Amino acid sequence: MKQKQSITEKLLLLFADFIDLNLQPVTIRKIQSLLDGDPRVRPTKIWFEKYFKDRKKQNFYSTIYRLKRDGYLKIKNGQSGDGYFLTPKGENKILTIKIRDLEKKKNSKDEWLMIIFDIPENMRRNRDMLRQFLYTLGFQKVQQSVWISPYEVYDKLKVVVNNLNIRKYIKILKVKELGEF
Protein backbone atom coordinates (compact mmCIF):
# COMPACT_ATOMS: atom_id res chain seq x y z
CA MET A 1 0.00 0.00 0.00
CA LYS A 2 1.35 3.40 -0.96
CA GLN A 3 2.10 5.75 1.89
CA LYS A 4 0.84 9.30 1.54
CA GLN A 5 3.63 11.76 0.79
CA SER A 6 4.12 14.85 2.89
CA ILE A 7 4.27 18.28 1.26
CA THR A 8 8.00 18.36 2.00
CA GLU A 9 8.50 15.04 0.20
CA LYS A 10 6.42 16.19 -2.78
CA LEU A 11 8.44 19.38 -3.11
CA LEU A 12 11.71 17.47 -2.80
CA LEU A 13 10.58 15.06 -5.54
CA LEU A 14 9.52 18.02 -7.68
CA PHE A 15 12.95 19.60 -7.34
CA ALA A 16 14.62 16.26 -8.07
CA ASP A 17 12.63 15.79 -11.27
CA PHE A 18 13.50 19.23 -12.59
CA ILE A 19 17.13 19.13 -11.48
CA ASP A 20 17.52 15.80 -13.32
CA LEU A 21 15.79 17.26 -16.36
CA ASN A 22 18.06 20.32 -16.55
CA LEU A 23 21.26 18.86 -15.10
CA GLN A 24 21.90 22.21 -13.47
CA PRO A 25 20.55 24.11 -10.47
CA VAL A 26 16.87 24.99 -10.82
CA THR A 27 14.93 28.05 -9.69
CA ILE A 28 11.26 28.33 -8.71
CA ARG A 29 10.66 30.49 -11.79
CA LYS A 30 12.31 27.84 -14.01
CA ILE A 31 10.07 25.13 -12.52
CA GLN A 32 6.97 27.23 -13.21
CA SER A 33 8.02 27.87 -16.84
CA LEU A 34 8.74 24.16 -17.39
CA LEU A 35 5.36 23.27 -15.90
CA ASP A 36 3.68 25.64 -18.36
CA GLY A 37 5.49 24.28 -21.41
CA ASP A 38 5.51 20.50 -21.05
CA PRO A 39 2.20 18.58 -21.26
CA ARG A 40 3.81 15.46 -19.68
CA VAL A 41 3.98 17.24 -16.32
CA ARG A 42 0.30 18.21 -16.23
CA PRO A 43 -0.44 16.30 -12.96
CA THR A 44 2.50 18.05 -11.31
CA LYS A 45 1.30 21.40 -12.64
CA ILE A 46 -2.20 20.82 -11.23
CA TRP A 47 -0.73 19.86 -7.83
CA PHE A 48 1.63 22.87 -7.87
CA GLU A 49 -1.18 25.32 -8.68
CA LYS A 50 -3.45 23.77 -6.03
CA TYR A 51 -0.64 24.01 -3.49
CA PHE A 52 -0.22 27.75 -4.16
CA LYS A 53 -3.99 28.29 -4.14
CA ASP A 54 -4.53 26.50 -0.80
CA ARG A 55 -1.50 27.93 0.96
CA LYS A 56 0.25 31.22 1.17
CA LYS A 57 3.48 31.60 -0.76
CA GLN A 58 5.23 32.07 2.57
CA ASN A 59 4.42 28.45 3.52
CA PHE A 60 6.02 27.31 0.28
CA TYR A 61 9.19 29.27 0.94
CA SER A 62 9.22 28.05 4.56
CA THR A 63 9.21 24.47 3.29
CA ILE A 64 12.08 25.26 0.93
CA TYR A 65 13.95 26.85 3.83
CA ARG A 66 13.46 23.66 5.89
CA LEU A 67 14.76 21.54 3.00
CA LYS A 68 17.88 23.73 2.90
CA ARG A 69 18.25 23.78 6.68
CA ASP A 70 17.94 19.99 6.90
CA GLY A 71 20.62 19.57 4.25
CA TYR A 72 18.51 18.24 1.35
CA LEU A 73 18.89 21.29 -0.93
CA LYS A 74 21.65 23.84 -1.44
CA ILE A 75 21.85 27.01 -3.46
CA LYS A 76 24.40 26.96 -6.24
CA ASN A 77 25.36 29.38 -8.96
CA GLY A 78 24.53 27.97 -12.38
CA GLN A 79 24.68 29.24 -15.94
CA SER A 80 21.33 30.98 -15.60
CA GLY A 81 21.93 32.37 -12.10
CA ASP A 82 21.49 30.99 -8.61
CA GLY A 83 19.35 27.92 -8.21
CA TYR A 84 18.75 24.86 -6.05
CA PHE A 85 20.43 21.51 -6.33
CA LEU A 86 20.16 18.28 -4.35
CA THR A 87 22.83 17.40 -1.83
CA PRO A 88 23.91 13.75 -1.40
CA LYS A 89 21.61 13.64 1.64
CA GLY A 90 18.77 14.92 -0.59
CA GLU A 91 19.51 12.29 -3.24
CA ASN A 92 19.37 9.55 -0.60
CA LYS A 93 16.07 10.94 0.70
CA ILE A 94 14.65 10.90 -2.85
CA LEU A 95 15.79 7.30 -3.27
CA THR A 96 14.19 6.37 0.06
CA ILE A 97 10.88 7.98 -0.93
CA LYS A 98 10.84 6.30 -4.34
CA ILE A 99 11.68 2.89 -2.89
CA ARG A 100 9.09 3.25 -0.12
CA ASP A 101 6.41 4.07 -2.70
CA LEU A 102 7.48 1.22 -4.99
CA GLU A 103 4.82 -1.32 -5.85
CA LYS A 104 6.46 -4.64 -5.03
CA LYS A 105 5.66 -7.49 -7.40
CA LYS A 106 6.45 -11.10 -6.50
CA ASN A 107 8.84 -12.85 -8.83
CA SER A 108 6.81 -14.93 -11.29
CA LYS A 109 9.53 -17.60 -11.60
CA ASP A 110 9.47 -18.42 -7.86
CA GLU A 111 13.01 -17.14 -7.57
CA TRP A 112 14.33 -15.33 -4.54
CA LEU A 113 16.80 -12.50 -4.75
CA MET A 114 19.64 -12.97 -2.27
CA ILE A 115 22.20 -10.32 -1.39
CA ILE A 116 25.37 -11.09 0.52
CA PHE A 117 27.60 -8.23 1.58
CA ASP A 118 30.77 -7.59 3.54
CA ILE A 119 31.11 -3.83 3.79
CA PRO A 120 34.14 -2.55 5.76
CA GLU A 121 33.71 -0.79 9.09
CA ASN A 122 34.94 2.54 7.70
CA MET A 123 31.83 2.50 5.46
CA ARG A 124 29.43 1.79 8.32
CA ARG A 125 27.05 4.59 7.33
CA ASN A 126 26.64 3.14 3.82
CA ARG A 127 26.18 -0.35 5.27
CA ASP A 128 23.45 0.88 7.61
CA MET A 129 21.77 2.75 4.75
CA LEU A 130 21.90 -0.42 2.62
CA ARG A 131 20.16 -2.37 5.39
CA GLN A 132 17.48 0.30 5.60
CA PHE A 133 16.94 0.17 1.82
CA LEU A 134 16.86 -3.64 1.85
CA TYR A 135 14.14 -3.58 4.49
CA THR A 136 12.19 -0.99 2.48
CA LEU A 137 12.54 -3.12 -0.67
CA GLY A 138 10.91 -6.07 1.11
CA PHE A 139 14.02 -8.08 1.94
CA GLN A 140 14.16 -10.30 5.03
CA LYS A 141 17.31 -10.82 7.06
CA VAL A 142 18.72 -14.36 7.11
CA GLN A 143 21.94 -13.30 8.83
CA GLN A 144 23.43 -9.89 9.55
CA SER A 145 24.85 -9.57 6.02
CA VAL A 146 22.64 -12.04 4.11
CA TRP A 147 19.19 -10.89 3.02
CA ILE A 148 16.52 -12.43 0.74
CA SER A 149 13.45 -11.19 -1.09
CA PRO A 150 10.70 -12.84 -3.16
CA TYR A 151 10.08 -9.56 -5.02
CA GLU A 152 11.32 -8.35 -8.42
CA VAL A 153 13.45 -5.48 -7.14
CA TYR A 154 16.79 -6.20 -8.82
CA ASP A 155 16.85 -2.93 -10.77
CA LYS A 156 16.04 -0.86 -7.67
CA LEU A 157 18.67 -2.76 -5.69
CA LYS A 158 21.24 -2.01 -8.38
CA VAL A 159 20.45 1.72 -8.16
CA VAL A 160 20.85 1.67 -4.37
CA VAL A 161 24.15 -0.22 -4.52
CA ASN A 162 25.57 2.11 -7.17
CA ASN A 163 24.33 5.20 -5.33
CA LEU A 164 26.03 4.09 -2.10
CA ASN A 165 29.22 3.19 -4.01
CA ILE A 166 29.47 -0.28 -2.43
CA ARG A 167 29.30 -2.47 -5.53
CA LYS A 168 32.59 -4.29 -4.91
CA TYR A 169 31.45 -5.49 -1.47
CA ILE A 170 28.23 -7.15 -2.66
CA LYS A 171 27.16 -10.39 -4.31
CA ILE A 172 23.62 -10.78 -5.65
CA LEU A 173 22.21 -14.24 -6.35
CA LYS A 174 18.95 -15.51 -7.76
CA VAL A 175 17.91 -18.56 -5.75
CA LYS A 176 15.35 -21.13 -6.85
CA GLU A 177 14.84 -22.84 -3.54
CA LEU A 178 15.35 -22.04 0.12
CA GLY A 179 15.75 -25.08 2.35
CA GLU A 180 16.49 -25.99 5.91
CA PHE A 181 18.23 -29.04 7.38
Image (cartoon, rainbow, N blue to C red):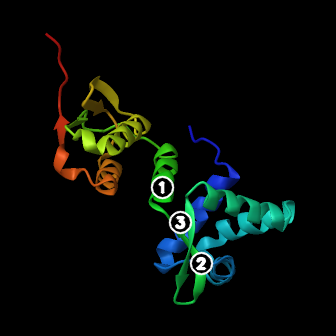
Mark 3 = which residue? 16
Report crowding for label 1: few under 14, some 14 to 19, many 20 or more residues within 10 A (C-alpha): few
Closer to the camera in the image, 22 or 149: 22
Report the residue at 46% width, 47% height from top.
Answer: 99
Mark 2 = which residue? 83
- Indicate the quadrant where residue 124 lies: top left
Report the residue at 67% width, 57% height from top.
Answer: 66
Q: Give the quadrant of the C terminus.
A: top left
Q: Looking at this rendering, what residue extends furthest in the left direction?
A: 181
Can you give x and y, in whole percent of width and height, for residue 174 in the image? 19, 38
- Distance from disc 2 to disc 3, alpha carbons, whole Å, reads 13 Å
Disc 3 element: helix
Up the image or down, 124 lies above or below 50; here it is above
Can you give x and y, in whole percent of width and height, for residue 128 in the image? 36, 38
Q: Which amino acid does label 2 sit on?
A: Gly
Q: What residue type is labelled 3?
A: Ala
Mark 1 = which residue? 89
- Distance from disc 2 to disc 1, alpha carbons, whole Å, reads 17 Å
Q: Earlier in the sequence, mark 2 or mark 3?
A: 3
